[in-house]
Amino acid sequence: MNLLLLEEADFTAADRVVLGDRRFTHMQEIHRVAVGDTLRVGRLGGQMGQAQVLRLEGHEAELQVTFDQPPPAKLPLTLVLALPRPKMLRRVFQTVATMGVPKLILVNSYRVEKSFWQTPFLEADAIQEQLILGLEQARDTVLPEVIIEKRFKPFVEDRLPAISANTLGLVGHPGNHPPCPRGLNEPVTLAIGPEGGWIPYEVDLLSKAGLTPVQLGERILRVETAVTALLARLF
């Protein structure tokens, strides 16, 4: 945890917070704080700053906080991602938040098992929990927007063209395609498929929506690896 992320319920006054959950445990066991110590903090959805420890007790800590720094800029990106398997999904949420993706759209695909959509990790509270862990790692305060689209064809045909308009549309897909571009400064809409890639029909629909297939080489990557590799290369 590189940033102590604070929510509205933590505040007892404009400049005071009381913590008694996992963040308090982290302060004790990892930071080993004492009264008078300072920590980096951020207000969820707001600015970052510092906190001074005013009081430590067996079950809670009271902090005085000030906020005077903006969070880091997000990437100019909309990420369209075929729903990963549940165990990987949690890590992907953290990665997306850590790397500064502002909008994540989870979509269905032929190779996405139907059971994946039943995972409790897609519940709103579970999603936010993993996104917050990613924000804490990156020292960010702004949650990515997560949109769930369970019907691939209607989404790609009816909504994706408007989303990708005025952006560079790309499909990460193994095969004989141009290499993924590097070091971009323009807005991007990027679609990444499941392990094994999109099926040809899906690539065709994505192409008709304005997204061009690109590749990272001959190796087939896990979804979480592909997300990191493509974002690092693009930006």
Image (cartoon, rainbow, N blue to C red):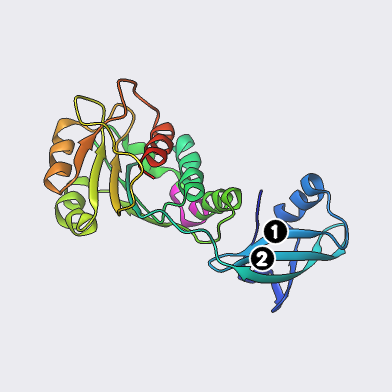
Residue 51 in which image quadrant: bottom right
Residue 190, percent from left and from top: 29, 45
As displayed, is residue 18 above or below residue 125? Answer: below
How far from the left and from the top, in percent, is residue 58? 87, 57
Q: Check disc 1: other Cα within 10 Å, few if <14, some if 14-19, many if 20+.
A: some
Describe residue 114's horizontal placement relative to residue 45 as left or right.
left
Residue holding disc 1: 40
Q: What element carries label 1?
A: strand
Pointers 1 and 2 in contact (C-beta within 8 Å): yes
Point out the stretch of residues depicted in magenta.
Answer: 122-127
- Left or right, 111 with reference to 53: left
List x then y, in percent, for residue 94: 51, 45
Q: Which residue is drawn at 51% across and 52% down?
A: 131
Q: Is residue 28 left or right of residue 174?
A: right
Label 2 CA crowd tier, 10 Å (few <14, some 14–19, many 20+): some
Left or right? Give the position of 80 relative to 85: left
Judge whether residue 45 is colored magenta.
no
Q: Pick whichever, 158 or 4, lies toward us.
A: 4
Residue positioned 14% across, 42% down in the render: 207
> Type of residue at label 2?
Gly
